[in-house]
Image (tube, helix red, strand yellow):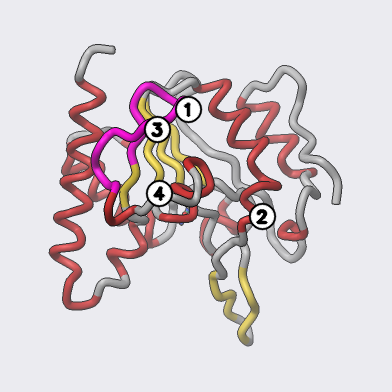
């Protein structure tokens, strides 16, 4: 494998082009494209998910599938404009296994998160968000270390140098999988997003 070809002086357009050539792990194989984050260059908040899903891989944009719809609903109800935040993932290629014609999501391994990290570091260096939110355990542990527990640490500012305010919450797809507990899972997610909204309106 080759090192991630991150441009020396990154900008979002340069990163978006360069990430397509990434061979830092094997996940590029069989995908349509790499999916970089999207949002304003100087967004005050960055939300980091796990990896693009099937729809994101095809369309080339983060959070445009079912998890994205859940995230959109939460952001809207928490009073956060999606267009004001930078949305990205810790892994830029879709990891899946083929079952017939379907592509089934597979959780990325730590080595994939590590191989992809230079891209997220470059996005952080360009955007420099004041508030950083990890969505789910893969993003939380990838960025903050293996001691983080989403269920225990969610919705409160955590100790990290990555941004002024760093928080974790569940991945929106976990709400879709919550079955009978879906309404409660969504309410808890919304409460975390309201804490993010609060952090965004508090002066630095
Ligand atoms: N899930 C993620 O973690 N990221 C996406 O972009 C879509 C689904």
Q: Looking at the image, can residue 7 be seen?
A: yes
Secondary structure state at the residue bearing disc 1: loop
Quadrant housing residue 84:
top left
Residue 132 shows which numbered tag? 3
Of mark 3 and mark 1, the one earlier in the sequence is 3
Which residue ends up furthest to the top in the rendered image? Answer: 204
Of mark 4 and mark 2, the one earlier in the sequence is 2
Q: Viewer-nearest of labels 4 and 3?
A: 4
Identify the residue under disc 2.
Answer: 112
Identify the residue under disc 1.
Answer: 162
Q: Viewer-nearest of labels 1 and 4?
A: 4
Q: Is mark 1 within 8 Å of ligand 1?
A: no
Q: Are marks 4 and 3 in contact (CB under 8 Å)?
A: no
Q: Residues within 10 Å of mark 3 (few under 14, many from 20)?
A: many
Q: Nearer the viewer, residue 86 or 50?
A: 50
Quadrant housing residue 179:
bottom left
Of mark 1 and mark 4, the one earlier in the sequence is 4
Magenta stretch bounds: 153-167
Q: How far apart in space, not on screen, are marks 3 and 1 (Cα)? A: 8 Å
Q: How far apart in space, not on screen, are marks 4 and 3 (Cα)? A: 15 Å
Residue 148 shows which numbered tag? 4
Of mark 3 and mark 2, the one earlier in the sequence is 2
Secondary structure state at the residue bearing disc 4: loop
In the rendered image, the vertical position of residue 191 relative to residue 65, given as above or below: above
């Amino acid at each position: 494998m080759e090192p991630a070809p991150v441009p020396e002086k990154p900008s979002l357009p340069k990163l978006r082009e360069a990430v397509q050539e990434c061979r830092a792990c094997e996940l590029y194989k069989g995908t349509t494209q790499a999916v970089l984050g999207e949002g304003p260059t100087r967004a005050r908040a960055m939300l980091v998910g796990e990896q693009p899903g099937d729809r994101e891989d095809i369309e080339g944009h983060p959070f445009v599938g079912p998890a994205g719809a859940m995230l959109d609903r939460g952001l809207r109800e928490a009073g956060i404009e999606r267009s004001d935040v930078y949305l990205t993932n810790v892994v830029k290629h879709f990891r899946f296994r083929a079952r017939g014609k379907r592509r089934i999501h597979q959780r990325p391994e730590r080595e994939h998160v590590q191989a992809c990290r230079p891209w997220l570091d470059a996005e952080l260096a360009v955007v420099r968000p004041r508030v950083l939110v990890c969505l789910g355990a893969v993003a939380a542990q990838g960025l903050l270390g293996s001691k983080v527990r989403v269920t225990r640490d969610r919705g409160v500012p955590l100790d990290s140098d990555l941004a002024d305010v760093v928080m974790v919450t569940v991945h929106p797809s976990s709400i879709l999988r919550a079955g009978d507990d879906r309404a409660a899972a969504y309410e808890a997610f919304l409460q975390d997003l309201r804490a993010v909204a609060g952090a965004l309106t508090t002066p630095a």
